[in-house]
Image (tube, helix red, strand yellow):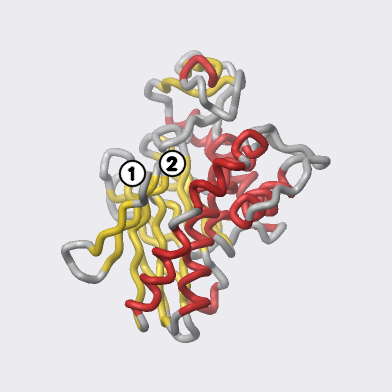
Amino acid sequence: MTPFVQLMPDGQRLHLQHGPSDLIIWAEGARDAAYRAATRRFQTIIAEIVDELAALREMLSPFSKRPGGPVARRMHDVCAPFASSCHVTRMAAVAGSVADEVLAAMTSNADIMRAYVNNGGDIALHLAPGTSFATAIKGHDGADLGRVRITANDGIGGIATSGRHGRSLSLGIADSVTALAPSAAGADVAATLIANAVDLPGHPAITRQPACDVDDDSDLVDLPVVTGCRQLSANDCARALSVGRRRALFFQSKGFITSAALFLQDHAATTGTHVLPSSEECQYVEN
């Protein structure tokens, strides 16, 4: 299959698509050179991942061998620190790693001031000194949940979102978790693991099935993934979010992430200072 390449109707953004990778790219500065570099690098990325896919889908351990391809190595390097304490495969960072790899090709071959590579909501971000970036956080139903505002001085190179309404299966009940980190790959795996931690084990409102029964290609194999969550009380939401927030704060203390925002039904929790709550109905909890 040949990758799809098209400049979007606004004439400002580039659309690249191949298999599960669906990229929207924007650059400010030497845009034409940046887009040429992005297109060249994207041509072989999916094939490179497929070559090592069996190993990348295995549950990671501290003894797992580092893979050979550049994208696979990105996936391994950001996931490896979590292998001793969490269920994680390298696939938890695949979307962010692809975004990082394409952005690296752009910045290496073009003089750009600002740029992003958005791979289905997992975003690799480049900010030259003195520049800034702002974006909205939207819920799975399109609701306005908040705003992300960052500057080049914040050291944030990635924004990623995960949760039970996303593209992948989740072990937790979070509607969504958005993580900000030094790289998109790092944000990707952190958002996944924080979303997994937002949970109420054994709660009667939550239904689960083995991952392989929901998707026979899932890298989570027979782990119980959430398939439904009925309306929870405010106390239940706060309890579940507090567990996820503790994991986010731990990741933040280790330097894995800079900030996170966690959402469950009409409740939310944040860490860091880069996420501004929406003025709408979402109730923020800090316990």
Q: CA distance from mark 2 to mark 1?
A: 7 Å
Quadrant the C terminus occupies? top right
Which image quadrant for residue 6?
Answer: bottom left
Between 188 and 255, the one nearer to me in the picture: 188
Query: Which residue is under mark 1?
Result: 139
Q: Residue at x 48, y 67 (%)?
A: 103
Residue 244 coordinates in the image, percent (x, y)? 58, 40
Which numbered disc, 2 or 1, marks the residue that appears first in the sequence? 1
What's the residue at 48%, 52% (across, down)? 160
Q: Residue at x 29, y 50 (%)?
A: 144
Answer whether labels 2 and 1 touch (C-beta < 8 Å). yes
Question: Which residue corresponds to the image point at 69% horizontal and 51% vertical from the top-left?
Answer: 68
Is residue 8 found left or right of 246 in the rendered image?
left
Q: Mark 2 highlights which residue?
A: 176
Residue flagged by tag 2: what amino acid is it? Ser
Rendered position, 93 above or below 164: below
Out of 234 and 207, give the one closest to the viewer: 207
**Rendering coords of residue 21 (x, y %):** 41, 47
